[in-house]
Amino acid sequence: MATWKSSAPSNIALIKYMGKEPGNRATNPSLSMTLRDFRTDVELDLLSSGAERDYWKPLPGSAPLRESSTERFVQFFQKLKAEAGVKECFEIRSGNNFPSDAGLASSASSFAALTKTAALAFSDMKKTSLPAPEILARLSQTGSGSSCRSFFSPWCSWEEHRIGGVESKLPELVDLVAVFESGYKKVSSSQAHQRVRTSPLFAERGARVQKRFEGLKAALAQGDFQKTAEISWAELWDMHSLFHTSEPPFSYFAPGTIRVLQWAEELWEKEGRGPITTIDAGPNVHVLVPTTDRAHYRQALLALGGLQVMESEA
Ligand code: PMV
């Protein structure tokens, strides 16, 4: 039996994709750091010719997906098959090396890994060359928008007409994620994308984000750590303010979320230095610091209590 395997990393956006249009088209550009240590593995087995349907199973030792997530994953695979003109059926197996659905963007790594593995399988079966990363990123975007940024590292931007790497003179960074919960999210990111459109803050978001996007690209190119941290801070509050002012409002914040934000704010105020801080659609706080400062910040975070720290380099 033929088997194909591949994996893809997750990513954390400093400029967020939120409030999507049909087909996962973005209303604004976004920019992220790729998290090479938070990964999804995907395996595809070609089933014998009598098989009538594709199905999904967790990789051994991995958690099962929710029914709705499984359905979305298999449907996306079938779309990839249709586009490649593949009629055969497959067993799809996948697993994350980090907790699913806990605000660690598992949809980014899982859809990127599925797209990559499907492309490997289909190009092998059809004896065609593997599509370029930007083509794969575009395909993956139609399954999960944020997954398109997992094809370039360590920094990637997604604009309407270009998905690709971004120049950075920052030192090598590590993402120390302060994790408070690993249960399922109450409001999925798909629901959040719809709900934010009801916020009175949404109408002007495009203009605010465009400015930050340009500012962040310049800060990265200049290696300006403090400016990067300021932009990331403003953008985290912008996205979460959309959530807090939607109709009806919702929030991902846990008590620990606020504690870590206050800690980061105080560091900048009192010491004039601190981390780059951001939060995804979840309670966990991503604390990005130079790899040389990893031990210091890890210890400081753990000293706050009531949290775990998960780490990924870019
Ligand atoms: O790719 P989706 O539809 O799961 O959207 C994810 C959106 C955020 O993670 C909240 C922000 C982002 O740009 O990654």
Image: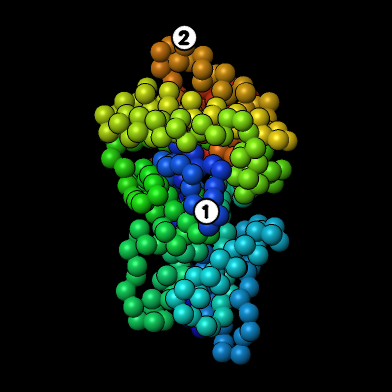
**Distance in Å between CA atoms under marks 1 and 2:** 42 Å
Mark whose residue sits in front, 1 or 2: 1
Within-10-Å neighbours for mark 1: few <14, some 14–19, many 20+: some
Q: Residue at x 62, y 62 (%)?
A: 72
Q: Is mark 1 within 8 Å of ligand 1?
A: yes
Residue 229 against residue 39 in the figure, above or below: above
Q: Is residue 167 above or below residue 267?
A: below
Residue beneath disc 2? 270
Three-letter amino acid code of the residue under disc 2? Lys
The reply to whether discs 1 and 2 touch (Cβ–Cβ < 8 Å) is: no
- Residue 180 visible in the displayed image: no
Residue 161, x across and y down, in percent: 36, 51
Q: Is residue 108 left or right of residue 129?
A: right
Q: Could you tell me residue 36's position as x and y percent?
A: 43, 48
| Left or right placement of residue 235 versus residue 218 in this view | right
Q: Tell me the residue at 55%/55% (across/down).
A: 22
- The quarter of the picture where residue 65 lies is bottom right
Regarding mark 1 in the picture, which secondary structure is present there? Answer: helix
Image position of 274 (left or right of 310): left
Image location (x, y in percent) of residue 259: 62, 21
Asked which secondary structure carries label 2, the reply is helix
Quadrant of the rendered structure where residue 126 is? bottom left
| Residue 67 sits above or below residue 13 on the image | below
Q: Nearer the viewer, residue 66 or 14?
A: 14
Q: Is residue 8 left or right of residue 256?
A: left
Question: Colour scheme used in the picture?
Answer: rainbow
Upstream in sequence: badge 1 or badge 2:
1
- Where does the image place residue 314, in percent across and percent down from the top left? 39, 42
Disc 1 target residue: 24
